[in-house]
Amino acid sequence: MTFTPIMFARHSQANTPANNVLQANSDTAIMDFSGTEAIPFLTTILGLDINKLTASGLGLRSSLDDDLTSSYAYALYYFNETAFRFVLAKDASVQLQSLINEQQLRYDIDYVMRNDLSALTLSGEQAFDALVDNFKLTPGLRLSDMRSCYGAQSGEVFITAIDNQDQQQFQLVARQAELDKWQAHLQQLGFDLTLADVA
């Protein structure tokens, strides 16, 4: 049997909050985006430079209104040349859906809103090590650009590393029942659950 490592990343320049915290993201939407003309749409209509997205899991942060701190900011993850995943606020997803719908006659693209998936944000001094240990990830990638992000699938959970306003954060994306199990486990490891939502 061959062992295939699941690579994972963190940002080399982002600050790591001291407190170990979990936040349920009730305002987060997940959109799987695909099509033979996905890349032309992303570069022409959204104006994204996706040349650095050369390996599955690599991603970038951008915004529909050019403001990474707004509710229209999103993370885009590359799976292959025809398949991507957006993680974004629900308001931004409505605007993005409208934009895609307008362009579907021009581009061979489609999307699926993953209403079956939810998100949980994790941050703090122990966050990276807790993810590596519990999800059997292989650390090794360092992201130097604050707009870069990374996602990896481990079992039923899609795990991401993002720089949110110069703070290192990680998101777990999965079905709610699976997230509930991980939330309980991470709370046992000392992560405090907060009620505030992360944009």
Image (cartoon, rainbow, N blue to C red):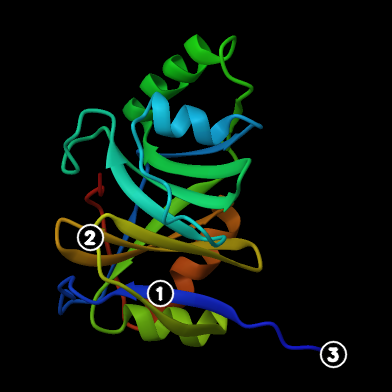
Question: Label 3 neighbourhood size at 10 Å, few (<14), some (14-19), many (20+)?
Answer: few
Q: CA distance from mark 3 to mark 2?
A: 38 Å
Q: From this view, report whether residue 169 is shown above or below residue 72.
A: below
Residue designated by label 1: 9
Q: Earlier in the sequence, mark 3 or mark 2?
A: 3
Say the numbered circle drawn on residue 146: 2
Label 1 close to label 2 by CB (< 8 Å) = no
- The local secondary structure at tag 2 comes to loop
Residue designated by label 3: 1
Residue 172, given in percent of the width and then of the height, sits at 46, 61
Q: Earlier in the sequence, mark 1 or mark 2?
A: 1
Q: Amino acid at mark 2?
A: Met
Q: Quadrant of residue 127?
A: bottom left
x 19%, y 43%: residue: 68
Label 3 close to label 1 by CB (< 8 Å) = no
Q: Amino acid at mark 3?
A: Met
Q: CA distance from mark 1 to mark 2?
A: 13 Å
x 27%, y 54%: residue: 147
The number of discs equals: 3
Q: From this view, report whether residue 112 is shown above or below residue 169.
A: above
x 48%, y 27%: residue: 41
Q: Quadrant of residue 33?
A: top right
Q: Left or right: where does residue 84 sit relative to residue 72?
A: right
Quadrant of the image containing the N terminus: bottom right
Q: Left or right: where does residue 10 sit relative to residue 180?
A: left
Quadrant of the image containing the C terminus: top left
Say the numbered circle drawn on residue 168: none
Question: Label 1 neighbourhood size at 10 Å, few (<14), some (14-19), many (20+)?
Answer: many
Q: Amino acid at mark 1?
A: Ala
- The local secondary structure at tag 3 comes to loop
Residue 9, given in percent of the width and then of the height, sits at 40, 74
Q: Earlier in the sequence, mark 3 or mark 1?
A: 3
